[in-house]
Image (spheres, rainbow, N blue to C red):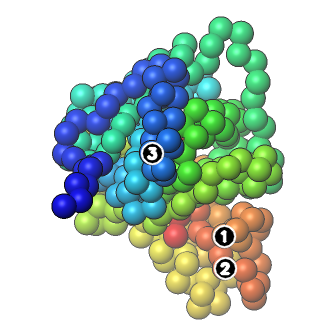
Amino acid sequence: MTKSTPVRTEAAPLVVRTLAELRTLTAGWRRAGETSALIPTMGALHQGHLALVRVGQKHARRTVTSIFVNPTQFAPHEDFARYPRDEAGDVALLASVGCDAVWAPSVEEMYRPGAATRIIPKGAGLGLETDFRPHFFEGVATVCCKLFSQSEANFAIFGEKDYQQLCVVRQMVRDLDLPIEIVGMPTVREADGLAMSSRNRYLTPADRQTAVLIHKVIVEVAAKVKAGTSLDAATDEATATLAAAGFNTDYLAVREAQTLHPWQPGSSNPPRVLVAAWLGKTRLIDNV
Ligand code: PAF
């Protein structure tokens, strides 16, 4: 009788906090001929993250979820200090989907004293988010490059909610020949359409009701553009609708889905509608 070794259980994932431990763990997986998928997160996990773990499990034998609130992608005035942190809750959620390991380094373990190297994305990283958060993609690209190298994972799974981030990461992997395959997954939404996000926890109950509008307006923009309405008319009207509901819009734009260059009607490249807007003290982003 052949004895099979179960690799996924509902046991708590192994939490590793040092690079040496992570390397030992993943080297063991590789020696056993097991592939792995990384799910990069900043914690405060929700069903959207768990869906990414499930996709990782479809691609690879082992999954490792990183939980690291990355200081280099926050500007001094942003929400690094108050970003929600709940490691015990996150680990319990990851156990419920059979994730194998959690990579949860301290800031000092991730950025050792004297660390001075940064990746500066251009291309898809120019404009949109960068116009409002100039530091952001430099921090994201640098930490993702480190996470890929630390985990030596075969796959990394990203949600499309952070669509520009996904484009930036794909471009970085291409440009730097990183030996990892990036898998993008459609946004997971609440029943009313709001994109799941760790930052939704900041919303007051009243703002939570209003927040759904951000998805509605970009769906409308997409429909109008498809029906031939001019880009300016469609986006101006949407921005006015958001403003009337109390949003302060950073950008609402129609771009080429692959390059994020401005999209022109009649183009053979599919368009993507992207938005970032403030509702009270919460910044929401979405795209369709
Ligand atoms: O999308 C996120 O949660 C973060 O930007 C990421 C990719 C984990 C990098 O810190």
Q: Mark 3 points at which residue?
A: 32
Instruction: Using the image as rendered, state which of residue 239 and residue 160 is in the foreground.
Output: 160
Mark 3 vs mark 1: in front: 3
Q: Mark 1 points at which residue?
A: 257
Query: Given the image, on which type of amino acid does mark 2 rest?
Result: Pro
| Residue displayed at 54% across by 60% down | 183
Q: How many labels does the image show?
A: 3
| Residue at mark 2 to residue at mark 3: CA–CA distance | 42 Å
Query: Given the image, on which type of amino acid does mark 1 rest?
Result: Ala
| Residue displayed at 78% across by 46% down | 176
Q: Mark 2 points at which residue?
A: 270
Tell me where residue 16 appears, x and y as whole percent: 39, 25
At numbered mark 2, what does the secondary structure look like: helix, strand or loop? loop
- Considering only order in the chain, which callout, 3 or 2, is on the residue closer to the N terminus? 3
**Does 179 sit above or below residue 224?**
above
Left or right: residue 167 compared with residue 159: right
Left or right: residue 226 compared with residue 217: right
Instruction: Using the image as rendered, state which of residue 105 and residue 135 is in the foreground.
Output: 105
Tell me where residue 276 appears, x and y as whole percent: 55, 52
For the residues bearing labels 2 and 3, Cβ distance under 8 angstroms? no
Q: Residue 102 carries which label?
A: none
| Residue at mark 3 to residue at mark 1: CA–CA distance | 39 Å
> Residue farthest to the front?
1
The quadrant the N terminus occupies is bottom left
Instruction: Using the image as rendered, state which of residue 41 and residue 179 is in the foreground.
Output: 179
Left or right: residue 11 compared with residue 275: left
Q: Is residue 33 among the parts visible in the rendering? A: yes
